[in-house]
Image (cartoon, coloured by chain):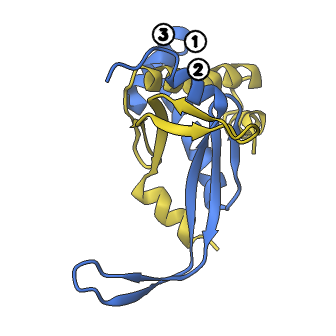
Chain colours: A yellow, B blue
Amino acid sequence: MNKSDLVQAVTSKLPTLAAKDVEVIVNTIFDSMTRSLSQGDRIEIRGFGSFEVRVRKPRQGRNPKTGRSVQVGTRRVPFFKVGKELKEKVNNHG
Amino acid sequence: MTKAEIIEQIYEKVGFSKKESSEIVELVFDTMKETLEKGEKIKISGFGNFVVRAKRPRVGRNPQTGEEIEISARRVLTFRPSQVLKQALNKSEIVS
């Protein structure tokens, strides 16, 4: 399922809304989540999971093409932790 | 940030009523959950992919007693962030 399939699926459940409007909303959801994470905020969606930003220490990396070592600075990475309810449902289904 | 704040954003930026905004946001996450429960992956371009992966059974150990136990085969949900999201988190200089 990609974003437009998601928009279609949601639209089919809410016949009063146009797909165009649902699309704007879906985009707004992920845009605001991205913005929130880039501010270092944690996101908690009950029943789904939580997103947080973890900091990776600087390390000595290597360019796989040239073999030359390069310094990789401190990086922030997004981390998703699946919620208990969804975790169980994903595991128990089929 | 919580679901309530996402709903607030939609109310402010898109102009739907709070009731409608809340209904749609719930439906978006419910639809994602249903899809993932079926084992289907979800790709949100610019954000990331939610992927259901099958794990084989393996032998684990109770860290308290040292006793070996079999961890059964299971399906787990993982999130793979997109390049765009990773870059968005590293735009500003990191002061540690």
Q: Image check: A1 left or right of B47?
A: right
Tell me if label 3 and label 1 are in contact, CB under 8 Å. Answer: yes
Which amino acid type is marked by label 1?
Answer: Val
In this rendering, the label closer to the viewer, 2 or 3 = 2
State which chain disc 2 sits on: A
The relative height of residue B18 versus residue A76 in the rendered view (above or below) is above
Where disc 3 sits, the SS reads helix
Confirm whether residue A34 shows in the render.
Answer: yes
Q: Which mark is residue B34?
A: none
Is disc 2 in the same subunit as disc 1?
Answer: no
Q: Position of residue B1 (x, y in %)?
A: 38, 28
Question: Which amino acid, by three-letter code, is at mark 2?
Answer: Thr
Say the numbered circle drawn on residue B12: 3
| Quadrant into which the C terminus of chain B falls | top left
Task: Say whether residue A80 is left or right of residue B1.
Answer: right
- The residue that label 1 is drawn on is B14
Q: Say which of marks 2 and 1 sits in front.
A: 2
Mark 2 crowd level (few <14, some 14–19, many ≥20, 10 Å Cα): some
- The chain to which mark 3 is attached is B
Disc number for residue A28: 2
Q: Residues within 10 Å of mark 3 (few under 14, many from 20)?
A: few
Image position, residue B85 (x, y; %): 59, 28
